[in-house]
Amino acid sequence: MSLHHTFGILTHPDREWESIRSDQESTSKLYLGHVFLLALIPTLSAYFGTTEVGWRIGDGAAVKLTQASAAQLCVLFYIAMLAGIFIIGKFIDFFSMTYGADESEHKGVILAAYATTPLFLVGITAIYPVLWINLLAGIIAVCWSVYLLFEGLPILMKIPEDRGFMFASSVLTIGLVMLVALLAISVVIWSIGFGPVYTS
């Protein structure tokens, strides 16, 4: 599996979701050909941005992380992205029967992976860590991912659009809960010695 769906999911999502559904792609192929590669974009961008460019608070000097600290945090970030896609996908499969999806259709991980494609791609902005640029790009990517979720769920799960809307709303809620949980876990991880270390 290559990245051939990546461009299509951004430019003509309706047709691309139909194509994705007909591919019968396995989770392992999806991870090897899509998730592992795209998750490297924000990871490597964040590493470069925090170690080589840095960010400024007011008129102060650029703040940077040490290479060891940045590498450690970026690896944890990469693992969290891979795990998050899988967990949300399994939640989608678990709740699919409630919304009338075919019990033989287990496409939750596929839906989660392709719907979050804009978030992976916009991670390139982490190369230049300026708050307003990263925030604006992030908002646009989140909006596009939400659109892809609402558009793709009824197609992949083969359910009516009204049920798909309710189902997608539930998935979005799960994603927000996971984000809050991730923030809480980050605080715990930082408190046990995995926090950022700044250059002097």
Image: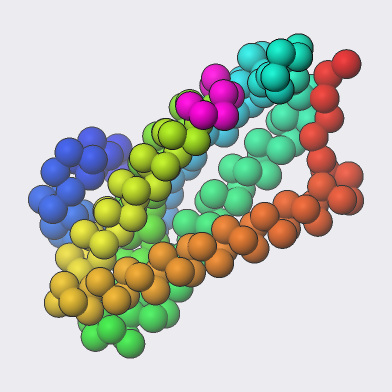
Determine whether, in the image, residue 101 is placed left or right of residue 199. Answer: left
Image point (10%, 50%), residue name? 15
Specify whether residue 130 is painted magenta: yes
Across and down, in percent, residue 135 comes to 49, 36
Residue 92 seen anywhere in this rendered image of the structure: no
Across and down, in percent, residue 88 comes to 47, 65
Residue 73 location, quadrant: top right
User: Which is nearer the eye, 48 or 86?
Assistant: 48
Specify whether residue 107 is painted magenta: no
Query: What colour scheme governs how the chains and residues are painted in the rendered image of this protein?
Result: rainbow
Region rendered in magenta? 127-133
Query: How many numbered badges does the structure rendering display?
Result: 0
User: Which is nearer the eye, 20 or 127?
Assistant: 127
Determine whether, in the image, residue 176 is placed left or right of residue 53. Answer: left
Query: In the rendered view of the protein, which quadrant contains the N terminus?
Result: top left
Image position of 13 with respect to 4: above or below? below
Image position of 141 with respect to 127: above or below? below
Image position of 184 with respect to 77: above or below? below
Image point (51%, 29%), residue name? 132
Image point (88%, 44%), residue name? 193
Query: In the rendered view of the protein, which quadrant contains the C terminus?
Result: top right
Residue 42 seen anywhere in this rendered image of the structure: yes
